[in-house]
Image (tube, helix red, strand yellow):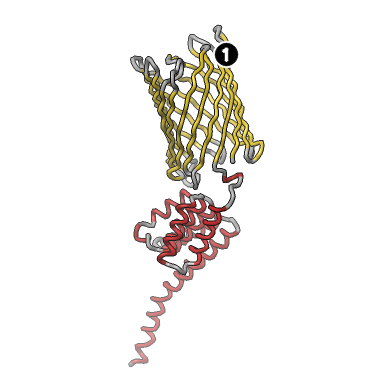
């Protein structure tokens, strides 16, 4: 009787266990193959293998971890971060997931956060070798001398000259000096700037402080304030803020950003508010086309509108250019007049630390002057 019943039970056991064994082998093989491809920098192929395996095993955490790891190696930090968030709070205590977060902070050069994350892992798991190696690597990076690509400071200075047609207008001249500091991790930059304007046979001087911050790889913003003591033709005070949000990624289609720039100028006799929403599309790396809808709301005056469009391109690792056109209201000496502007320029890295910029613009101010603007500036990183 026992001999008669044993084979069916054995066969049933094999039928139940077989899929589990095949499943485990399939996941392990997919992870191993993807790692081999990623080590050869064949990231799309590595990701394709993992994504195919996930269709059969959508809840397998190890497959998700392997995919996030490859995305991080690829440099696709925003996608890796999104995938980490998708794992949910249930995986927050998973040491492997914690390691991914620490590595991601390290790759982004956010060394203080990476160090803290590695230390948190080692507090709970003192023998975690990868976390220990990551901590050592981060500490070395923080102690290492700053290289050209890891500069902490930048100083910029420049000169601008404006000549005029159609009216008997004396030339304008402008000079500026700006110092920028990049915080560790390079997500935040602070700057101070002094600008001297020689216009209308008078001189105004502006003092500006501001900051830029990247909240994530797909959200960034800026803000700055300006004062001009005893201003004759410039705003006495200015506050400005703006930023950009990426709403479509390269994985979905062309990267698309929604932008917003806002500025409030306080003159001696009037106030002017500029609000400029826009969109920027990046068809390929190093190239973008952007347009803005410009709104100028001057106190005790009718609100006026305009738009601009700009193309930015990268010719080589050291050469970049931009061209654009604007048909929009412009405020000069507290008077807002519609102005058509053609503009363009280029920049070149003459050394790894030094960038040279040249620019030209032609302003056709309605029922007023035509202004030819040339400018040159140089920046040095250290």
Who's the residue at 40% across and 18% down the image? 267
Image quarter where the C terminus lies is top right
> Closest to the observer: 124 or 208?
208
Q: Quadrant of residue 306?
A: top left
Who's the residue at 44% across and 21% down the image? 229
Residue bearing mark 1: 171
Image vertical order of residue 240 relative to residue 169, above or below: below
Q: Is residue 353 left or right of residue 306?
A: right
Q: Is residue 253 left or right of residue 36?
A: left
Who's the residue at 59% across and 45% down the image? 149
Tell me, yes or no, if residue 275 can be seen here.
yes
Q: Position of residue 43 (x, y in %)?
A: 55, 55
**Mark 1 Cα-neighbour bin, 10 Å: few <14, some 14–19, many ≥20:** some
Who's the residue at 47% across and 55% down the image? 114
> Closest to the observer: 186 or 217?
186
Q: Position of residue 359 (x, y in %)?
A: 59, 25
Tell me, yes or no, if residue 315 can be seen here.
no
Total number of numbered labels?
1
Q: Position of residue 230 (x, y in %)?
A: 44, 18
Image quarter where the N terminus lies is bottom left
Q: Is residue 374 left or right of residue 191?
A: right
Q: Position of residue 215 (x, y in %)?
A: 43, 43
Q: Quadrant of residue 244?
A: top left
Image vertical order of residue 53 relative to residue 345, above or below: below
Image vertical order of residue 138 relative to residue 328, above or below: below
Q: Secondary structure at mark 1?
A: loop
The residue positioned farthest toward the right in the image shown: 350
Q: Is residue 271 left or right of residue 130?
A: left
């Amino acid at each position: 009787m026992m001999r008669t019943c044993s084979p069916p039970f054995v066969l049933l056991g094999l039928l139940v266990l077989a899929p589990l064994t095949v499943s485990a082998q399939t996941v392990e093989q997919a992870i191993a193959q993807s790692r081999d491809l990623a080590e050869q920098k064949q990231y799309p192929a590595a990701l394709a293998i993992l994504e195919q395996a996930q269709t059969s095993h959508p809840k397998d955490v190890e497959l998700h971890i392997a995919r996030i790891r490859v995305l991080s190696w690829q440099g696709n930090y925003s996608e890796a971060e999104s995938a980490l968030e998708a794992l949910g709070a249930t995986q927050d205590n998973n040491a492997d997931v914690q390691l991914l977060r620490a590595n991601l902070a390290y790759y982004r050069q956010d060394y203080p956060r990476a160090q803290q994350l590695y230390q948190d892992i080692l507090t709970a798991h003192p023998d975690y070798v990868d976390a220990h190696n990551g901590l050592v690597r981060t500490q070395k990076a923080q102690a290492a001398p700053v290289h050209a690509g890891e500069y902490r400071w930048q100083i910029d200075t420049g000169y601008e000259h404006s000549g005029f047609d159609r009216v008997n207008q004396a030339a304008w001249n402008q000079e500026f000096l700006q110092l920028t500091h990049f915080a560790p991790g390079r997500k935040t930059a602070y700057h101070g700037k002094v600008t001297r304007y020689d216009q209308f046979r008078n001189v105004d001087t502006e003092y500006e402080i501001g900051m830029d911050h990247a909240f994530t790889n797909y959200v960034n913003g800026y803000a700055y304030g300006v004062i001009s003591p005893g201003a004759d033709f410039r705003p006495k005070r200015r506050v400005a803020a703006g930023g950009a949000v990426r709403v479509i990624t390269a994985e979905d289609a062309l990267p698309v950003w929604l932008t917003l720039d806002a500025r409030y100028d306080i003159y001696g006799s009037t106030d002017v508010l500029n609000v400029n929403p826009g969109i920027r599309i990046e068809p390929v790396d190093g190239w973008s086309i952007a347009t803005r809808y410009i709104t100028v709301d001057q106190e005790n005056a009718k609100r006026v509108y305009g738009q601009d469009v700009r193309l930015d391109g990268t010719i080589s690792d050291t050469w970049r250019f931009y061209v654009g056109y604007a048909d929009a209201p412009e405020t000069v000496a507290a008077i807002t007049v519609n102005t058509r502007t053609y503009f363009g320029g280029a920049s070149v890295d003459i050394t790894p630390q030094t960038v040279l910029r040249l620019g030209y613009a032609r302003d056709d101010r309605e029922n007023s002057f035509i202004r030819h603007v040339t400018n040159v500036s140089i920046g040095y990183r250290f």
